[in-house]
Amino acid sequence: MDVGHALLDMGGGARLERFGALVTDRPHPGALGARGDPAAWRAADLRFDRDQGWSGDADIAEPWPIQVDGLDLELRATEAGQVGLFPEHAATLPWLRERVAARVGEDSTAIEAPSVLHLFAYTGLVTLALAAAGAAVVHVDASKPTVSWARRNAERSGLTDRPVRWIVDDAAAFTEREVRRGRRYAGIVLDPPSYGHGPGSGAWRIEDDLATLLAATGGLLEPGGFILLTAHTAGFEEDRLADEIGRALRRPAGAIDAGPLELSTADGRTLALGAFARSSGGA
């Protein structure tokens, strides 16, 4: 049985995906064109409609398991039409593991693991991959239920003994406090939403607030520290994300790598889902 993820088909403004044992049919504005296999869509276990919510033969109240990159995770059908995993982020994990390994290799006598700050950390895929690679992670998300979900994923993956701090807080407010405390991190990972609300704080808008947050992170990075920025917002394609990092952290263009976040079907069709920009700190 396939216990991972696969983009099975797309078209008509929707995406058909296998998440573990269940197949979901969910809307996506970028999934244009004709569908390849109408019969597969009719057999979906769960369907999401923006007006009517979830439907299908599977019990939407019950979580189900998935394995991604060696991690055991719990998925759930949420009211927003999500399932607790952005599978396109799995493509960023090898680079992150390499960055952690490089930091460990720089000082083999170090007692403490390299520290990584993960902002807008969601249900923990990246956090747990970093922890499994040997990093000490500060996992920050504004949603208490989502942080609890991430902690369950740590339990499922056998990583509760790893040095992870689980923080329910506004990303910008937490970052500003860390700067005042004089904290430093070997790496920072951010996946900001288009819009959001922190606990007890004002609204987040990526258009208005990303540059300020990135500038603050510059005060947290150790010399040569790495950064990964991902986004799923129209207008924040790879070139813009690279420019944002370059301006905020004063890093040259040659030190920044950028590209699309995407998934592909078995027959080679590609669904664009966002972009990334990253820098390991070197030129």
Image (cartoon, grey):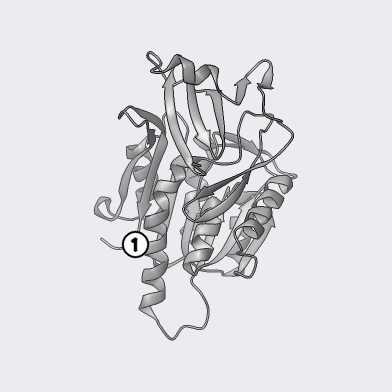
Left or right: where 193 falls relative to 276: right
Residue position for label 1: 281
| Residue shown at 47% from the left, 32% from the top | 233
Where is residue 115 shown, x and y percent of the image? 52, 68
Left or right: where 257 falls relative to 94: left
> Vertical placement of 186 versus 197: above or below?
below
| Residue shown at 70% from the left, 31% from the top | 60
Q: For residue 169, say whether it is visible.
A: no
Kind of residue at badge 1: Gly
Where is residue 18 shown, x and y percent of the image? 51, 34
Label 1 sits on a secondary structure element that is loop
Where is residue 200 shown, x and y percent of the image? 75, 44
Q: Nearer the viewer, residue 2 or 212?
A: 2
> Vertical placement of 47 versus 136: above or below?
above
Mark 1: few/some/many CA within 10 Å (<14, 14-19, 20+) = some
User: In this view, which residue lies farthest toward the bottom?
Assistant: 109
